[in-house]
Amino acid sequence: MTAPDLPRVTPSARSVRGPSRAGLSRVRVGNLGPRLLLRTAFVGVALLVLVLLLSGCGNGELPARTTAPATPSPTAGPTPSPSPSPTRTTPAPETTRPTTEAPPSDRSGGTGGTGGEGGTGGSAPQPGAAPPLWPAGDAATAKRMQQQADDGGDPWLLDPEEVAISYVGAELGYRDPSMTELAPGRFAVTDGRSAAKSTVSLEQTVRKGPGGIWLVTRVDRY
């Protein structure tokens, strides 16, 4: 009887070398395993030490930062207010005329004349009249004031008592004047708030009679 012709089975290289490779791998793992573990342990310890050092350095107290003392800002002191300078009061000169009468003016200018100071319509200074003191200080001003009165202005200049009251209030400072007529155009004046007394004389230096203005020509103070 003839045996069947069966295929020949040749063991493969994998099956032959399989056990040897497996044994070799086991040997390598067995030899290198402790070294690798030891190396890993060293690396871990080194990392731990490094972490501890770093944490120790980080937690260490840093040197205190020195800060320069703040320079105090200069405080502005109170500004000295300028002391008021004393006001010097200059007393007003008294307008009291001397008791001696001034000589009459030699300027002529009759009614309607054409002289240097003469005017028309009786506006020339009266012969023998004292020079005016107030409110006109010279003959030219007195003539202009007479013209204004002729035109209807300043009617108080036509009343000698009104002129005298205005004078003592404006020039002598009387606040409560009391007047007594001594003669036409001459008044004794006293102040109700002081012991001041005076005698005021007035004249119509430009034109006498109705319509002529009255001007103060003399003042005697007591």
Image: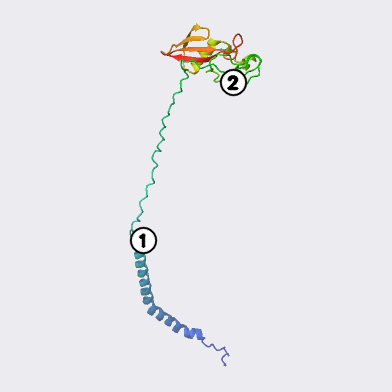
Query: Can you give x and y, in whole percent of width and height, for residue 136 in the image?
Result: 55, 19
Pick whichever, 129 or 5, lies toward us.
Answer: 129
Q: Quadrant of the N terminus?
A: bottom right
Pick whichever, 101 or 148, lies toward us.
Answer: 101
Residue at image location 44% in from the left, 84% down from the top? 20
Q: SS of the residue at dot 2?
A: helix
Judged by depth in the image, the label closer to the viewer, 1 or 2, is 2
Query: Residue placed farthest to the bottom in the image?
Result: 1
Q: Quadrant of the C terminus?
A: top left
Are there few (<14), some (14-19), or many (20+) residues within 10 Å of tag 1? few
Find disc 2 in the rendering and name its residue.
Answer: 140
Find disc 1 in the rendering and name its residue.
Answer: 58
Query: Can you give x and y, in whole percent of width and height, for residue 21 in the image?
Result: 45, 83
Above or below, 204 against 12 in this view is above
Q: SS of the residue at dot 1?
A: helix
Quick check: can you spot residue 152? Answer: no
Above or below, 2 against 162 in this view is below
